[in-house]
Amino acid sequence: MNKRLIIIGASGHGKVVADIAKRLEIYSEISFLDDDLTKNISGYELLGKAEDFQKWKSGHDFLVGIGNCRIRSRIQKKIEREVAVATLVHPNAVIGEGVLLGPGTVVMANAVINSASVLGKGVIVNTGSTIDHDCTIGNYVHVAPGCHISGTVSIGDRAWIGVGSCIVNNVSVCEECIIGAGATVIADIGERGTYVGVPAKRINHDD
């Protein structure tokens, strides 16, 4: 092991990313960058602020460990032109044949991604979530814990799929939508906003 990883973002999501990286046993050193230099990450070094990434770009992989889709997108787009962006999959996740994962994507414990699904850059597939066959998940999507996405679903960039929600097969969800916790999506969603309930209905517009 001579690879080193720097995680940008030292809050809760970043800590989970660090745990995955540690379990994979491919990095000799894991450290953080965060704009709040007072954070204490037990067992890991906080090297500086996010804007300091260029100081360590040689010899390090990077990953943006921030849950907010828009912030994660903004930071990864800034750094990916200059550094190597990692992709991490927890050892207890199941990845099917022909699945493609973009740079910066993280797949967490007990998640399942079935055959021929394609995930873009910076996607979070959180704990215990399932994505079935032939799905297309856009860049910087957050699939929260316990979500179930059926086969041949398309989700646009920077969408947030809330904890415990379900999306039936053969539907599309447009970019930057928020699907509320426990909601069930049974038809295409083509207008940005927040959708809640069973079946999911739009409650507001989110610019």
Image (spheres, rainbow, N blue to C red):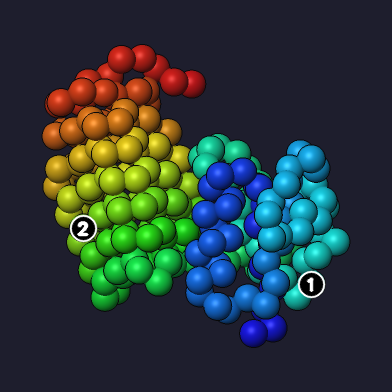
Q: Give the number of callouts.
A: 2
Identify the residue shown where x is 22% and y is 47%: 148
Q: Position of residue 179 (x, y in %)?
A: 32, 31
Q: Residue furthest bottom?
A: 1
How much space separates mark 2 and mark 1, taking CA atoms? 37 Å
Helix, strand or loop for disc 1: loop
Identify the residue shown where x is 44% and y is 51%: 124
Q: Residues within 10 Å of mark 1 (few under 14, many from 20)?
A: few
Question: Earlier along the polypeptide chain: callout 2 or callout 1?
Answer: 1
Helix, strand or loop for disc 2: loop
Give the answer, above or below, for where 105 lies relative to 51: below
Give the amino acid at mark 2.
Answer: Asp
Identify the residue shown where x is 40% and y is 38%: 159
Give the answer, above or below, for where 1 lies relative to 184: below
129 or 38: nearer the eye? 38
78 or 36: nearer the eye? 36
Q: Quadrant of the N terminus?
A: bottom right
Left or right position of 84 against 37: left
Labels 2 and 1 touching (C-beta < 8 A)? no
The answer to whether residue 78 shows anywhere in this view is no
* Residue matched to label 1: 58
* Residue matched to label 2: 132
Q: Position of residue 68 (x, y in %)?
A: 53, 38
83 or 40: nearer the eye? 40
Identify the residue shown where x is 27% and y is 45%: 147
Give the amino acid at mark 1.
Answer: Ser
In the picture, the disc for residue 114 is none
Q: Position of residue 197 (x, y in %)?
A: 21, 23
